[in-house]
Amino acid sequence: MATPPPPTTTTATTTASPFDFPREYHFPPFFTRQTNLTTHHSQLEKWSVLILSYCRHHRLFKLSLSAPATEDLFHNRRLNRRLSVADAREVLDFMRKDGRVEYVDGGGAGGGDVVWVFWRTPEEWAALLEEWVDGTAQKGAVLTLYELTEGEGTRGTEFHGLDPELLQKALQVLVKRGKAQIFGQEDQQGVKFF
């Protein structure tokens, strides 16, 4: 039996096609904090959209400001411009207020280096799981969490390869709605759908 990936894994799979950066990414002022409040807000929104698109494309569920995997996200080599760590944290805090980012260790603004990036929120993942359960007649069935993210039955679904911790967050949404029950030990948990 295959072993599930360790919980520190930040990517499930990578997409073979290169990511198309938006036109703003090729404009030097995009990497410099804008002083005009309206322009700065627009800049934060554009960085937010870029981060969500980038993470979705590469199926990144966690983002670290110091990880080499995100080097090209915050550093445009052609322009030789880089978003400062302080400015990147400001963008992440902006996204946190919109519910699209959450610090992994529960730290507040500027409190950590690693964040969850919700290009799909736990509620949206829960809706996809619920739709799959209904569509495949899995109500009443007991499945392991590993089967849900790595099993043959979920191959081709958007949640195949989902980070195990994010799966837990989505399942907690279903538990609160009375649609699922999680049981078992931490390394061998199962879920029953209602």
Image (cartoon, helix red, strand yellow):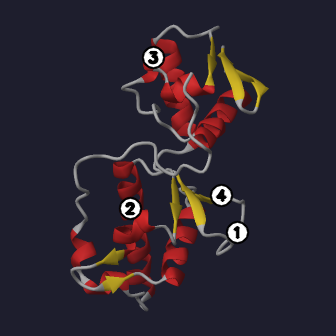
- Residue position for label 2: 49
Question: What is the crowding at mark 1: few (fewer than 14 residues within 10 Å), some, or many (at least 20)?
Answer: few
- Residue position for label 1: 108
Question: What is the crowding at mark 3: few (fewer than 14 residues within 10 Å), some, or many (at least 20)?
Answer: few
Q: Measure the C-alpha gap from mark 3 to mark 4.
A: 29 Å
Q: Quadrant of the C terminus?
A: top right
Instruction: Provide the secondary structure element on which disc 3 rests.
Output: helix
* Percent of width and height locating residue 16: 25, 46
Above-or-below relation of 119 to 1: below
* Percent of width and height locating residue 177: 69, 27
Instruction: Provide the secondary structure element on which disc 2 rests.
Output: helix
Above-or-below relation of 43 to 132: below
Q: Earlier in the sequence, mark 2 or mark 4?
A: 2
Q: Earlier in the sequence, mark 1 or mark 3?
A: 1
Instruction: Provide the secondary structure element on which disc 1 rests.
Output: loop
Amino acid at circle 4: Val
Instruction: Provide the secondary structure element on which disc 4 rests.
Output: loop
Of tags 1 and 3, the one toward the viewer is 3
Amino acid at circle 3: Gly
